[in-house]
Amino acid sequence: MIEARELTKRYGDLTAVDSVSFEIQRGEVVGFLGVNGAGKTTTMRMLTGFLPATDGTALIAGHDIFGEPLAARRAVGYLPEAPPLYPEMDVEGYLAYVAALKDVPRGARREAVERAVTRCGLSEVRRRVIGNLSKGFRQRVGLAQAIVHEPPVLILDEPTVGLDPTQIREIRSLIAELASPREGETQQAVILSTHILPEVEAICRRVILIHEGRKVVDGSVEALTSEYGTLDQMFARHTYAAEPTGAPAREGGAQT
Amino acid sequence: MRHLPAIAGRELRSLFVSPVAYVVLSLYAVLAGFFFLLALLQYSEWTLYLQAVGAADQLASLNLNDTLIWPFLSLMSVVLLFLVPGITMGLFASEKANGTDELLLTSPLTIWEIVLGKYLAAAGLVLLLVFLAGLFPALLFWKGDPELGKTASGLIGLALVGLGYAAVGAFASSVTRNQFIAFALSFVLLLLLWMLSVLAAIQPAMGALGGAGSWVVDLLRYLSTEEHFQRLGEGLVDTQDLAYFAVLIGVFVLLTKASVESVRWR
Ligand SMILES: Nc1ncnc2c1ncn2[C@@H]1O[C@H](COP(=O)(O)OP(=O)(O)O)[C@@H](O)[C@H]1O
Ligand SMILES: [Mg+2]
């Protein structure tokens, strides 16, 4: 569903993303790991067509992001680092607007909004103005706009950042639920970026770790845990390579 | 272009949800009423004066269009100079400030749909303003006998001025994420555009630039919005003037498109 082919992004002299390749299938939930500044957001912005790659390309649901940009973008649901919300709109109006932008046929929009509202637990705030919602609800609205057109590919950039522990738990279980669809719902390929390891353990079965723009690890959580002992050690090994193994857990590192 | 209604509709709704549309509309209506009254009083005072001194010739040449409606429309075009930047300042700047540009640019939309959708929304509000202004001269048909053609071409001129200003304002909004900067920039650009005619009209300035007939003065005159608007106000509907507004709008809409696109290629 997602195929990154040597994606590269340079900002002047800085290579923010350096020849990153990977493939993600339907039904996979992949944790995209890396310290702050590793290049996660830049990679996701290239996959979604927000930023052009300096080099390389990607296929989204079989559509090249350069060759068929509209078809590729139609297949993506994207939650940016800051949820793209209009504070003056109400939740339903906003989701209907996004559905129109994402080419949900007019007749199917009401149903699409209804489904997104239900799945993201927004029923009680559906007529509220987004600007008056709590941060947790706003994040849910952000998720709802990403799934309103039922895209085969879901790209979530730090979906739990800035939330309190209760909200984090809710959003995580929501993502886990989105990843394991019920009867009649299609499977999605999900990639979510984070630097919080328990988040990965909670909802992902596969991990891609990037460091300084390069992909350094790509494997199943299970295999990596048995290879390194814990994900935390795997993370520490590759992101603080100069230090001896067993370096103290840094920001975002999980307690082992 | 099938996304145009969604984009234009959201933009209009946001203008009417925020106080922007109401502030602009009521300000314009109040100023229009004030200036119209002023023009009316001046007209009657002038009539009385000419009657008192018995200047029959001048009295005969006095007409509602040139002595009342045109000065009024001309003032209303100056008001647009201040209000249109208020309408357009948020078009693109607020998307960037909200982070919603990331939604627009990752949706299956073309840049043209985004730019034209937003321009249409701003244009809609501008036309509403011109409609409001047009109600006042329309009153004159009730009691007086202004020329319909001249009045209509003046109003069309005012509408074209407003639409041109909206294109300039849209461009200013597309180059920044700060609405106040967008307002200031479009105001400065519009002021320059407007001042060209003042400059071209000042004799010493014209002299310094080679006098009337020199190509610099001709160019300044041609570029000035006021110059073309005035001819429409005189009832002269010339393709050259219409083309001027079409080019003004076209150039700034194109610049806006390039500027929105450049975000993607930066
Ligand atoms: N617009 C930009 N201009 C210049 N450098 C940038 C820009 N955006 C990101 N970077 C740099 O690229 C690197 C990767 O950033 P980012 O992808 O945001 O990392 P992450 O999301 O993993 O925290 C960082 O060093 C960041 O400073
Ligand atoms: Mg990031």
Image (spheres, helix red, strand yellow):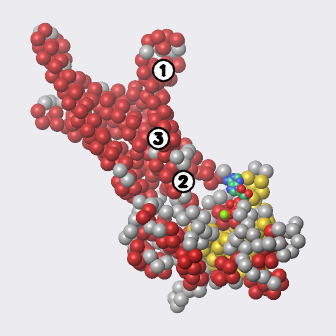
Residue A21 in sight here:
no
Would you place residue A158 above or below residue B220 in this image? Answer: below
Q: Is residue B57 left or right of residue B199?
A: left
**Dot 3 corresponds to which residue?**
B183
Q: Secondary structure at mark 2?
A: helix
Does mark 2 fall on the same chain as mark 1?
A: yes
Amino acid under label 3? Phe
Query: In terms of sequence position, does the residue under pointer 3 or pointer 1 come before the other?
Result: 3
Crowdedness near tag 1: few (<14), some (14–19) or many (≥20) residues, C-alpha within 10 Å: some
Q: Nearer the viewer, residue A133 or B145?
A: A133
Query: In terms of sequence position, does the residue under pointer 1 or pointer 2 come before the other?
Result: 2
Q: Residue at x 67, y 58 (%)?
A: A52
Q: CA distance from mark 3 to mark 1?
A: 30 Å
Badge nearest the viewer, 3 or 1: 3
**Dot 1 corresponds to which residue?**
B218
Say which quarter of the image contains residue B103: bottom right
**Dot 2 corresponds to which residue?**
B96
Query: In terms of sequence position, does the residue under pointer 2 or pointer 3 come before the other?
Result: 2
Q: Secondary structure at mark 1?
A: helix
Q: Residue at x 43, y 38 (%)?
A: B165
Q: Nearer the viewer, residue A49 or A32?
A: A32
Amino acid under label 2? Lys
Would you place residue B9 above or below residue B135 in this image? Answer: below
Residue B16 in sight here:
yes
Crowdedness near tag 3: few (<14), some (14–19) or many (≥20) residues, C-alpha within 10 Å: many
Quarter of image, ligand 1: bottom right
